Amino acid sequence: MKRLFPAVLSIILSVNVLGADWINVISRTDVSDILALDYWIWISYRGGGVVRYDFPTGSYDTLTTAEGLGHNYATGLAADDDYVYIATRNGLSKYDRFDGTLEHVIRMWGYAYNDCTGVAADERYVWVSTLEGARRFDKEFGEPVESPITWKSSRPLSRQLDDGWTPYVNPGQTLLDDVYGVNFGRRLVYWGGYDKILVFDPVLDLWQTLHVASRGYRFIRKIIERGDSIEIYTSGGAGVLHPASGMVKPFHPRLAGVDVNDGLHFAGYHYVAAADGLYVRRDDGEPFVFPVGTGLDWESEKDAKKRKPSPLWRVTESFSGAPVNCLEPFGETVLVGTTDGVFVFDPTSGDARPLPISKGLAGPAVYAVLDAGDYLWAATNDGLSLIDVDGFSVRNYRNPAGSDWDQLRDLAYLGGKVFVAAEPGAALFDPLRETWLTFGVTENGFGGSGVCCAVFDERPFLGTSVGLIELDGTLKPVWRYTTADGLPSSDVVDLASDDTGLYVATRWGGLAKIAGDGSTTYVDIDNGLSSPRLLSLTAAEGVVYVGAYDQGIDILTPDLEVIGHITRTDGLSHTDVRAEAVNDGYLWVAIRDVGINAIDLDGEGEVERYYARYGLGDEHCRGITPLAPVGGRTRLAFATAGGVSILEYDGEPPDFTVGDPDAGYK
């Protein structure tokens, strides 16, 4: 029986590269920016790529790394007559507004400098703020010059082509490092830094630093030049900056100390987007006459009865209490981007309605994927998701025990139910009855937090930060394994099992194995392991693979005899391995912060690498799950910080770096 419940529409696109398909199933909730172009509404998400929404029809397209986006963590949007520019955690992408092609512009200054925070565009240049300084791209630049460029900097740089990018790291002796946004004034470019604003005159090529002396105004995300004044919107509030003194006058006392993300002046109103809601006031300073029925939490009972006007009010109920991230004018309304989607807000009535875009996964970060044949279960940071592999529609489930129980870390099967490791402990989800059963480590006297789970010999085990707990089928505790029972250390980081036993990786002691009779053996650095600190493990085809901190992979027999190692000299991108899986003659490993490696276990050929810029949803991968082949094609699912990525290919694992001039960058 395939259909257990109605499917929720979730549009997912894929592309074919070298006989391989990437599919990214993502979350579309945490909005970072909005751009309105005619009737098209562009929305960028933190972890969810970009959506292009057609307002008249309600249809929309999703752009992810599978379609060529630089990264699914998108931070900003801008446009000119020809392109839409998308700032991501992995450089800049641009979408051709006429032919619909998407191009990733990666070479901003070497890969280590591509964590973008914002983007703006004028007739000649594209301006990009990053966490390693400011960037400017000359749109009139021709073909890249195939020769390195030496920049005057104390920082060593990777190979760089002359391709139209100008970096500003410390221009004119001005300290310019982390930059959190870029905005245009009348003739100046404003960059938001930490405790300061960097002002650039592109005509005179001059820089000026405006220091912010007022306490608490740290991360400056937006600067608005308004007449002769400068408005700033920061992590510590919003107000008008006095350039000479560096003091800030808050727009309103209630905005002092509030985490503010954006600001907008539009149609006579002033909007402030903050973590605790949307603030609105009239530009002329006159008080509002509150619409009847509007949820205004600044009215006292006395004022509410008299309907006393106020010069500033805050809307929270319309947006379900979600933090507000960004604002964009749209017709006579304002588009409000929140951590729970986009709303269309009418200031005259106070009404807000959400754009009907499917949210996708329960949360943006996925820690584990469990294969269920026609479905995939995904453990996210905000609940359990079920993905239909036919159309990639998504159904989400949240634990009624509370939000802490939705911070999921691992999955396994237990008698047709989903066995879950969550922060507070273990849970058992029955998909037919849609019911939850929980086991809390604290209330049962064990302490610590849930980290991982596994089932061995039909017995469920929960790995925690302070030990291993064996449970029964109703999640009642049977036994707690600690160092007294033979574990080399009590802080469990990963579990795996085969027919011979349960393998337990610990954070600081080594690797243990628990046999069916409960006896325990272990191996540590004194008898073969590369490191006392372990990160991950898997057991497949009579071999155990262990991710050892800063040492790569140790290879062991089921008897815990170390028989080999895989390190950088064997082709690994990095030596911190966070997950492993064996599939079709290859060992697939998730490397810390840099994506996936596929290792030929027969020792033939080079190690294949998979990064976000080649289609993988996010380089932060936490789990790998081999899936059953479909039509003779090999399939794998990757649990990443940006959702679930599925790779399908024919024959051997594909090499996406062929013909890519950026393939040699680290």
Image (cartoon, rainbow, N blue to C red):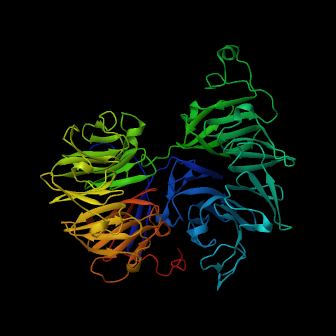
For image coordinates 85% across by 67% down, the residue present is 203
For image coordinates 76% across by 65% down, the residue present is 123
The picture places residue 319, in percent across and down from the top left corner, at 56, 35
Splitting the image into 4 quarters, where does residue 140 fall?
A: bottom right
Splitting the image into 4 quarters, where does residue 247 fall?
A: top right
The picture places residue 377, in percent across and down from the top left corner, at 32, 51
Residue 627 visible within the image: no
The number of numbered discs placed on residues in the rendered structure image is 0
The picture places residue 366, in percent across and down from the top left corner, at 40, 53
Closest to the observer, 242 or 365: 242
Q: Is residue 441 above or below residue 628?
A: above
Q: Is residue 425 above or below residue 198?
A: above
Q: Is residue 258 above or below residue 141?
A: above
Residue 469 visible within the image: yes
The picture places residue 528, in percent across and down from the top left corner, at 28, 70
The single residue placed furthest to the bottom in the displayed view is 147
Closest to the observer, 209 or 39: 209
Splitting the image into 4 quarters, where does residue 316 fall?
A: top right
Q: Is residue 101 above or below residue 519?
A: below
The single residue placed furthest to the left in the displayed view is 517
> Is residue 584 found left or right of 42 in the rendered image?
left
Closest to the observer, 116 or 645: 116
> Is residue 303 found left or right of 407 in the rendered image?
right
